[in-house]
Image (cartoon, rainbow, N blue to C red):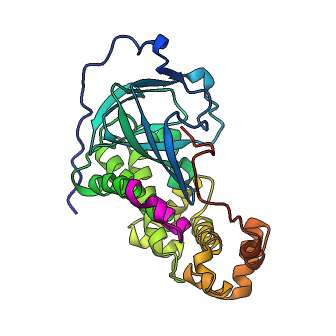
């Protein structure tokens, strides 16, 4: 695949004063888990959240004084389906229209302006899921991302597909979330490589690439840290070092990803025809007792008990809070 050409964020004239408060269009985001006015649909796919927002002109501001930097961070990907979005963060601003998209981070101050009636599709990714830190995301925020070629086009089209069809997905919801995260990770890795100006950024791009590689091969019982290191032309010691920066190890990360996938399958009523052992084997665990012990150690309950006690509430809701 040809490298994505990363456009420089368009420098478009911006207003010298905020949209009038008297019109009720200026909104201070006090809690990033509060739901944005105009959200018409929220859909949770594992740890990935998709939402649709409709509304008129508005300005959203998240000031530094309201941000708890010890809280879990999120990276938001926004594509305008109609209208225009201006995102200000990290000393930059980007102006995007369909099919472009843009990112912003929940742990740093930002301003978002929709100067006209709009409809917007968004994806929300926890930093932890993507292997990113707030420092890493500074390369990604408030930059216009092409939606017409390469991986950028795949991400942009994914948002369109989720707008049209996400409500019809009733099974394998957690697995779909993993696939969405994998595609986003591949895009972010390519994006960071193209923007990287130092070794730290290059190392983070490598980390994203490694995580995507692992997620694609969780069913392989021979997937080991040594195999991963060899595939990416790095030493095992270096592989361990970059995972250590995220307070984990390659082996632990592989195990936790396998367990998370098993948990998603056990929570899916559409997969109840699979035995507990078969669910484990689909994610690389061979031996039902070994799988059951690891699952219990991770989640405090056996796979069989989890399947019986799983939460059967609908995945789609318009009343539950969604991070902004």
Q: Residue at x 24, y 25 (%)?
A: 11
Q: Is residue 178 above or below residue 193?
A: below
Q: Position of residue 130 (x, y in %)?
A: 50, 53
Q: Is 236 displayed left or right of 279 in the figure?
A: left
Task: Inspect the magenta stretch and tell me whether residue 297 lies in it.
Answer: no
Q: Residue at x 22, y 40 (%)?
A: 7
| Residue 206 seen in this snapshot | no
Q: Is residue 100 above or below residue 171?
A: above
Q: Is residue 290 above or below residue 92?
A: below
Task: Inspect the magenta stretch and tell me whether residue 171 lies in it.
Answer: yes
Q: Residue at x 64, y 31 (%)?
A: 68
- The residue lying toward the viewer, choosing from 235 and 324, is 324
Q: Residue at x 55, y 49 (%)?
A: 126
Q: Position of residue 134 (x, y in %)?
A: 52, 39
| Residue 237 seen in this snapshot | yes
- The residue lying toward the viewer, choosing from 213 and 292, is 292
The range drawn in magenta is: 163-177
Q: How many marks?
A: 0
Instruction: Quarter of the image for the N terminus: give it.
Output: bottom left
Q: Is residue 205 above or below residue 145?
A: below
Q: Main secondary structure of the magenta part?
A: helix
Query: Which of the 4 image quadrants contains residue 253?
Result: bottom right
Q: Is 157 displayed left or right of 301 in the figure?
A: left
Q: Position of residue 322 (x, y in %)?
A: 58, 43
């Amino acid at each position: 695949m040809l490298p994505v050409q990363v456009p420089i964020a368009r420098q478009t004239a911006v207003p010298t004063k905020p949209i009038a408060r008297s019109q009720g269009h200026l909104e201070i985001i006090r809690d990033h888990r509060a739901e944005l006015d105009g959200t018409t649909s929220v859909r949770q796919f594992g740890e990935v959240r998709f939402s649709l927002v409709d509304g008129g002109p508005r300005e959203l501001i998240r000031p530094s004084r309201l941000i708890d930097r010890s809280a879990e961070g999120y990276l938001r990907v926004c594509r305008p389906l109609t209208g225009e979005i201006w995102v200000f963060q990290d000393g930059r601003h980007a102006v995007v229209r369909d099919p472009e998209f843009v990112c912003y981070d929940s742990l740093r101050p930002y301003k978002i302006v929709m100067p006209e009636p709009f409809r917007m599709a968004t994806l929300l990714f926890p930093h932890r899921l993507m292997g990113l830190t707030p420092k890493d995301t500074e390369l990604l925020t408030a930059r216009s991302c092409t939606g017409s070629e390469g991986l950028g086009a795949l991400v942009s089209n994914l948002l369109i597909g989720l707008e049209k069809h996400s409500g019809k997905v009733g099974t394998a919801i957690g697995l779909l979330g993993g696939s969405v995260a994998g595609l986003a990770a591949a895009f972010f890795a390519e994006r960071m490589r193209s923007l990287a100006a130092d070794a730290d950024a290059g190392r983070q791009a490598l980390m994203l690439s490694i995580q995507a590689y692992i997620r694609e091969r969780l069913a392989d019982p021979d997937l080991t840290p040594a195999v991963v290191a060899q595939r990416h032309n790095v030493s095992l010691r270096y592989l361990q070092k970059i995972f250590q920066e995220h307070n984990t190890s390659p082996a632990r990360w592989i195990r936790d990803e396998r367990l998370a996938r098993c948990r998603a399958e056990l929570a899916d009523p559409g997969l109840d025809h699979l035995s507990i052992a078969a669910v484990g084997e689909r994610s690389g665990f061979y031996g039902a007792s070994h799988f059951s012990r690891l699952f219990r150690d991770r989640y405090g309950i056996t796979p069989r008990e989890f399947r019986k006690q799983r939460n059967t509430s609908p995945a789609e809701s318009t009343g539950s809070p969604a991070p902004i």
